[in-house]
Image (tube, helix red, strand yellow):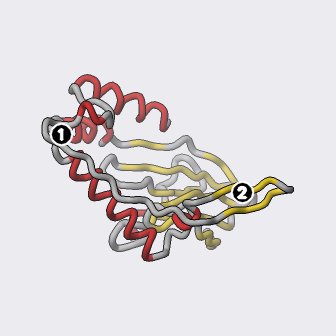
Amino acid sequence: MHMRHATLAAALMMAFGVQAADPASCPAGTQLSYPVTQKVDQTDNYHGTTIADPYRWLEDANSAETKKWVDAQNAVTQAYLGQIPQREAIRQRLTKLWNYERYSVPSKEGGRYFYSRNDGLQNQSVLYTMKKLEDQPRMLLDPNTLAADGTVALAGAEVSPDGKLLAYGTAASGSDWNEWKVRDI
């Protein structure tokens, strides 16, 4: 599914004449000035082989230095993207193409059916359950309400074989770190 979106995005960018981040394709007069990325003297020894890891400090997503570096990188990126005249047309076209109602295929665990649905305007699909396919679905988990500012995403969900428990993982602010919770269905 991600490949389909990537292919669509690439096709749209080509259709609108937007080129990749090739410095030669920058709008006239654009000077890209990337922030300096600090290198540290960090090495590890793996079975007698020394491996340099000068950017290890970037792995601490909660450090003030990493946050400052990410903010500086984002500032360069947003300044460049903000100069692309076709950007708004691409955003509008992608919004039109992606904002449609979607359903997952139902699965059955422990005598219950589970599926997800997105009305087309939601950031994340909502998980529903029902005993029979003809029943009115009951909302089980709405990941869009996990954080008031929308920065917590559903990273995965699994139903126990008896259909009584839901384990779900969340990721805050785009982090790769997940927090898993278990709740009754």
| Closer to the camera in the image, 116 or 151 | 151
| Closer to the camera in the image, 162 or 29 | 29
Three-letter code for the amino acid on which mark 1 is drawn: Ile
* Above or below for 31 versus 175: above
Disc number lying in front (2 or 1): 1
When asked about the image quadrant of residue 173, the answer is bottom left
When asked about the image quadrant of residue 145, the answer is bottom left
When asked about the image quadrant of residue 50, the answer is bottom right
Q: Which mark is residue 180?
A: none
Residue on which disc 2 sits: 110
**Residue for point 23% across, 41% down:** 91
Residue on which disc 1 sits: 84
Q: Is residue 73 visible?
A: yes
**Residue for point 17% across, 36% down:** 27
Q: Is residue 170 visible?
A: no
Image coords of residue 37 (percent x, y): 43, 59
